[in-house]
Image (spheres, helix red, strand yellow):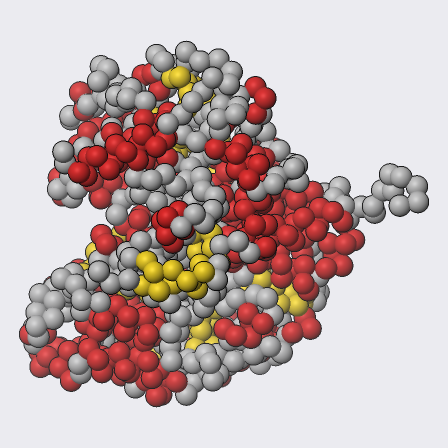
Amino acid sequence: MTTLDIYIDDKPLKVEPGKTILEVCRENDIDIPTMCHLDGLTDVGACRLCLVEIEGVNKLQSSCTTKVSANMVIHTQTERLKRYRRITTELFFAERNHICAVCVANGNCELQQLGYKVGMDHIRYPYLFPSCEVDTSHDYMVMDHNRCIMCTRCVRVCGEVEGAYNWDVMNRGFNVRIISDFNTPWGESGTCTSCGKCMHACPTGAIWPKSLSGEQLHKNPEMISELVKKRKMNL
Amino acid sequence: MKPGLLTTSAELSKTDPRVKLIAAKIKKENARPEALIEILHTAQNAYGYLPMNVLSYITHSLHLPPSRVYAAVTFYHFFSLKSKGEHTCLVCTGTACYVKGAQAILHELEKQFGIKAGHVTADQKLGIQVARCVGACGLAPVVVLDDVVEAKVNADQIIQEIRAKIS
Amino acid sequence: MNRQELHTMAIKAREQQASCKHKIGVCCGAGCISIGAEEVLKKMQEDVKARGLESEVAVVPTGCMGPCNQGPLVKYLPENTIYQKVNAASVAEFNQAQLVEGKPILSSLIFADSRTKPFINAAEDPFFHKQLKIALKDCGELNPEDIDDYLVHGGYTALSKVLFQMSAEEVIAEMKQSRLRGRGGAGYPTGFKWETVYKYVSDQKYVICNGDEGDPGAFMDRSVLEGNPHRVLEGMAIAAFAIGANKGYAYIRGEYPLAIKRIELAIKQAKKIGLLGSNILGSSFSFEVEVRIGAGAFVCGEETALIASIEGKRGTPRPRPPFPAESGLWGKPTLINNVETFAAIVPIINNGGEWYSEIGTPKSAGTKVFALAGKINNAGLIEVAMGTTLREIVYDIGGGIQGEGQFKAAQTGGPSGGCIPASHLDVKMDYEALVSLGSIMGSGGLIIMDEQSDMVDVARFFMEFCMDESCGKCVPCRVGTKMMHDLLEKIYMGSATKLDLDRLEELAIYVREASLCGLGASAPNPFMSTLRHFREEYENKIQPEVQLVKGI
């Protein structure tokens, strides 16, 4: 098989064509934070955490959606990228009502880990405190929009893996919200199969099982990736 | 699937000419899911907004997930899930109109009729809306009253015209 | 219909028109219609008939003539005399003077109220003679609802030339030679764009005409579509031939019902005589066009969002690459050009790429249509050669600032653009010059502001627009524009400190560089350019730093 020569952070690498920059980085232990990416789901390039610099390209590119090409020279850890990752993280926290101390996902939250990773010691932007609903209508899961970061992993896993299309996004701009059906309470959805994949795909405490109280939540997003892989294997 | 949530055309009267219009449009487009927006345009024009049972009907006919339809409807400003009122007054707040004082006209209208832009009076007679630019910049400021473009307006004149319409 | 038949048809239409001594055009652009042009047209037809002149005087509705501010407008040809602010009651009087007595009514001529001596031949008025009309050439002259009139003006000869005398490569070479750049805003060289799509091998390709003109203050595309829809269709067909597409979509903003009506009518007419459809003019080339109506989302002007919208989805952009040229509509190679770009294709094919490339400036060839609005005397639609100075546009064509005011700034490029201050009035308007001033050409909205305009408020206004129009997909745009708007509001209200301004500047660069699509990437422009040219207005609104601890 042909391979491509590329450079990531000054390190020469031989890689298979067709892979994304993010895939190559993960294979080579180069750490790039992500939120909207989940192995097995279609990438959308929405969270902008995985932005990288590519020499000769004047725009920053999301590594999850950009495929490697021959002689690409990529930088993943420049001061500018680190600064932007931190701003993005702060904007996530300021956008809705993320209060780790009272969150069921405390200690098991990808957003919280991201905060540590990018060295977020405080948030320089005013909290927006939007009024968000908590949908407790489902028999055994809760959707708390206060903790949602609009990564749309639930939307994609529901459509692409489960095939139910219960979730989608309504409105636009700052007013976007995850909806089920016609913005119907989750418990009254006509399409939800109650499979729980969205709960595992969700990186924060936005979707969680009712049976849990604080800090008990353990999610298993890798299960989704495994599921997708096994389906492709056609066992 | 739980019953009663995905209402079919059962709730819609088959003899309603508006329903016929939508049905004809769906047929013309071969019920292709990608024609969703075209079909929503037809429905919006027929009803002036998109009632939920009409949305259900379209969703069913195109075999689309309800969430996908609702997502599209709420994305585009042209579509409305609420009735816009018997008469509509749309104030253009595009740049040219803005430079020529559209905000003051809007404030005056809101004050006079006691509703904010995007809302309808309690008696459903009047809805006030804003547009980002109706493209008649040479005639700024512009107000569109029931689909008629009124050029170089002032607040008093528009208020009088509205009063004449809704009284 | 074959090529010869088209030729015969044009000759016949021409002879028929030549039998008329006079042609009266009533401007029926959306602007003039809103102030009663249709009534004027009706009255005009009645009056000509009452005089028994209908065999020698043709009365036709036309597209936009330009000076929208002075409408409704009526134009008498061949004299090229334009009357302004015509109402139905005064029609008989004008006809009497023009058609019977042959003596124009000077006091009602175009710009009679602002010129010491108005011009009987409107082309001599500075508003017109400083312009160079290529994209708009026949707009305001021909009847947009009559394909015969288009044929009289040489319509579809460019398509015929391309089909029978040129190869796809030659068409692309001609476009490259013309140095035409995309008129939608970004200014990407059109010939290269065509070549890229041409090179992708695929069983199906698409051509999309982007008529989702969403910038507030811009109405160029609307006027072209309303005034000369066949020109756009012909341009699309030529593009389709060049890249190897057989299906096109005209995506038109829902707010433009008249433009939609006229392009739909034009498609119907062209189809009827075989200028669209299978085996056009007997060649092996087939091309269909469908209209798609936008549903009110500014972001759909962005190529990938527009494609999503045509596919019936939320109009959210996706990261590029892959570019639409490789993977566009339904994943097929797709060419997207703006309305004004398509309108320039026909003259380039007819007169050659070299001719076009010699107009304008070295890096920006040709002409640009601007929608001139704001605090200016002669608001309306204009087309000038690239490199025309802002001063010429404002004072010669625009007739100067309205009322007693002084020119303060011109805003170009709408919510993605910036401001040009008075100190740069002599800037030669082209892509590079505007970028060097921190603005952009954009699609062509040109809003003139006098000193009453508060630049912080202007920046806040545009940021509010971007915030409302953000699709909400990526974080920098969704949250960043909201934060920037709130900070601008805080400055405007006078409660911000220097720290807020610093934070705003940092955020502006972040939003520009980290956003997914052009909407977010350009959203900070109005703020950054007003800050660059009018920093003192920001600083005047800022609270002095409070010293919390003595001695620091």
When the figure is inspected, residue A222 is found, relative to residue C98, above or below; the finding is above
> Residue B158 versus residue C487: which sits nearer the camera?
C487
Whether residue C282 can be seen here: yes
| Apparent side of residue A213 relative to residue C264 in the rendered image (left or right) | right
Q: Residue at x 54, y 43 (%)?
A: A88
Foreground pick, C494 / B127: C494
Name the residue at 43% across, 31% down: A203
- Count all numbered tags in the image, as a single digit: 0
Q: Position of residue B124 (x, y in %)?
A: 43, 26
Q: C142 or C414, which is in the foreground?
A: C414
Residue A226 pos. (x, y %): 28, 33
- Work out which quarter of the rendered image holds the N terminus of chain C and state it: bottom left
Q: Quadrant of the C terminus of chain C?
A: top right
Name the residue rendered at 28%, 70% in the picture: C196
To which quarter of the image does residue C39 belong?
Answer: bottom left
Where residue C437 sits: x, y (%)? 60, 70
The image position of residue B105, as x and y in percent, is 59, 43
Q: Is residue A216 above or below residue B136?
A: above
Q: Is residue C73 visible?
A: no
Q: Is residue C90 left or right of residue C178?
A: right
Left or right: C138 in relation to C389: left
Residue that appears at 16% across and 61% down: C204
Residue C235 appears in which quarter of the rendering?
A: bottom left
Farthest residue in the right direction?
C551
Residue toward you, A159 or C518: A159
